[in-house]
């Protein structure tokens, strides 16, 4: 017998109800115990419930993290899932520390001092507010954004998200509301030269060829590092690029929150590794890395929202790091190496 139904994407939805029920009951019994001091059950039961509730909350947190790492979230749900994760962490820390102290001190609320008992109840009340806020965000992910809900039908959409036909224009650059996309088409080289700022190197170091389905950037080994970016400064964002790197040797990075050549965030391929991190003062620090075994056309996606940084390869999470919020900046590409890169599209979507 399979304990997890086939239609259930992961075990997290089965676990989350336990900490809510157990910890809420523990707090309510503690409050009732303030006015009913002669009951042995009311003195002993809350501690048992706090232990069980804290353990189940920890399990719920880690199953939730594992579930989130397996989902490519829609843009509008990114802030909600980040807040849900952060609130859950604060909740287990508060209840975990409180329960540990209560166990170690064998605090059974047998003191006749009402103020001491009231203080001991006030702490988990704060935790209860965090718990309910966490649960509300989890419900929003399911019922507003449809996370974890099986879809009976999926509307067909243009994967590039273009609002214009690249075969009918001379400038294949779609831009509106801080969002932009650069894609193959007549005049792609002109866009690169006129609409991107070259932070390192120049457009002359790149040979731009291709057709309406594939834009090819050719880089010579003598070109050194080429770094170009564009767009209105954005802090929270999703940057995507579909590229074929089979004929390129070196490093190809999506860069965003770009201030200058010494300060930017990055995600991409460096040799045989997926790399993800930030550069501050010219020094790199990594959010994470993974082995790179890709071949052919691959979609890279970097999501920056608050203190959470995720990197995806073909929709699968490759890295997930945390750090201070990055300042608003431009977005672009950093190339070091030589060869040919085939690009299907590069897009930037802002996160409000």
Image: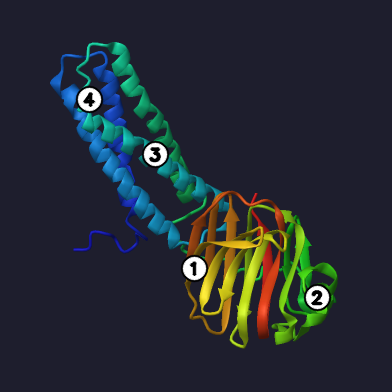
Q: SS for tag 1?
A: strand
Image depth: mark 2 or mark 3 in front: 2
Residue in front for this viewpoint, 125 or 309:
309
Q: Earlier in the sequence, mark 3 or mark 1?
A: 3
Classify 172 as above or below 264: below
Number of the label disc, if any, that sits on residue 289: 1
Q: SS for tag 2?
A: loop
Relative placement, left or right, of 313 versus 174 is: left
- The 10 Å Cα crowd at callout 2, few under 14, some 14 to 19, many 20 or more, is some
- Residue 124 % position (x, y): 35, 29
Number of the label disc, if any, that sits on residue 202: 2
Classify 117 as above or below 269: above
Q: Earlier in the sequence, mark 3 or mark 4?
A: 3
Give the distance between the C-alpha atoms of the residues marked 3 and 1, in whole angstroms: 29 Å
According to the picture, the residue beneath numbered tag 3 turns out to be: 91
- Residue 99 % position (x, y): 28, 34
- The 10 Å Cα crowd at callout 4, few under 14, some 14 to 19, many 20 or more, is some
Corner quadrant of residue 249:
bottom right
Image depth: mark 3 or mark 1 in front: 1
Q: SS for tag 4?
A: loop
Corner quadrant of residue 177:
bottom right
According to the picture, the residue beneath numbered tag 4 turns out to be: 107
Give the distance between the C-alpha atoms of the residues marked 2 and 4, in whole angstroms: 69 Å
Classify 22 as above or below 184: above
Is there any visible trace of residue 104 in the rendered image?
Answer: yes
Give the distance between the C-alpha atoms of the residues marked 2 and 3, in whole angstroms: 50 Å
- Residue 4 % position (x, y): 27, 59
Residue at position x 30%, y 16% in the image = 116
Residue at position x 45%, y 48% in the image = 85
Q: Quadrant of the N terminus?
A: bottom left
Relative placement, left or right, of 14 versus 250 is: left
Q: SS for tag 3?
A: helix
């Amino acid at each position: 017998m399979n304990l997890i139904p086939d239609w259930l994407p992961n075990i997290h939805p089965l676990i989350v109800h336990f900490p809510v029920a157990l910890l809420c009951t523990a707090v309510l019994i503690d409050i009732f115990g303030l006015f009913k001091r002669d009951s042995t059950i009311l003195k002993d039961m809350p501690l048992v419930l706090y232990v069980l509730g804290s353990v189940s909350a920890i399990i719920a947190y880690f199953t939730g993290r594992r579930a989130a790492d397996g989902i490519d979230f829609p843009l509008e749900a990114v802030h909600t899932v980040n807040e849900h994760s952060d609130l859950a962490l604060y909740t287990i820390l508060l209840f975990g520390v409180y329960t540990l102290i209560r166990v170690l001190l064998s605090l059974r609320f047998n003191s006749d001092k009402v103020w001491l008992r009231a203080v001991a109840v006030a702490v988990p009340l704060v935790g209860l507010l965090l718990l309910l806020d966490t649960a509300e965000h989890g419900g929003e992910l399911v019922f507003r954004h449809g996370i974890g809900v099986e879809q009976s039908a999926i509307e067909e959409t243009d994967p590039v998200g273009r609002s214009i036909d690249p075969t009918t224009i001379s400038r294949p650059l779609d831009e509106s509301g801080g969002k932009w996309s650069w894609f193959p088409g007549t005049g792609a080289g002109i866009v690169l030269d006129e609409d991107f700022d070259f932070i390192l190197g120049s457009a002359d170091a790149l040979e731009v060829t291709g057709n309406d389905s594939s834009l090819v950037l050719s880089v010579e080994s003598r070109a050194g590092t080429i770094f170009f970016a564009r767009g209105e400064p954005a802090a929270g964002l999703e940057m995507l690029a579909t590229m074929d790197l089979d004929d390129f040797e070196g490093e190809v990075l999506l860069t965003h929150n770009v201030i200058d050549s010494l300060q930017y965030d990055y995600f991409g391929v460096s040799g045989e590794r997926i790399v993800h991190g930030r550069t501050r003062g010219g020094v790199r620090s990594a959010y994470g890395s993974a082995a790179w075994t890709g071949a052919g056309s691959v979609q890279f996606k970097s999501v920056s929202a608050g203190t959470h940084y995720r990197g995806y390869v073909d929709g699968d999470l490759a890295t997930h790091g945390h750090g201070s919020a990055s300042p608003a900046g431009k977005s672009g590409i950093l190339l070091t190496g030589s060869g040919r890169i085939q690009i299907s599209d590069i897009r930037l979507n802002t996160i409000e």
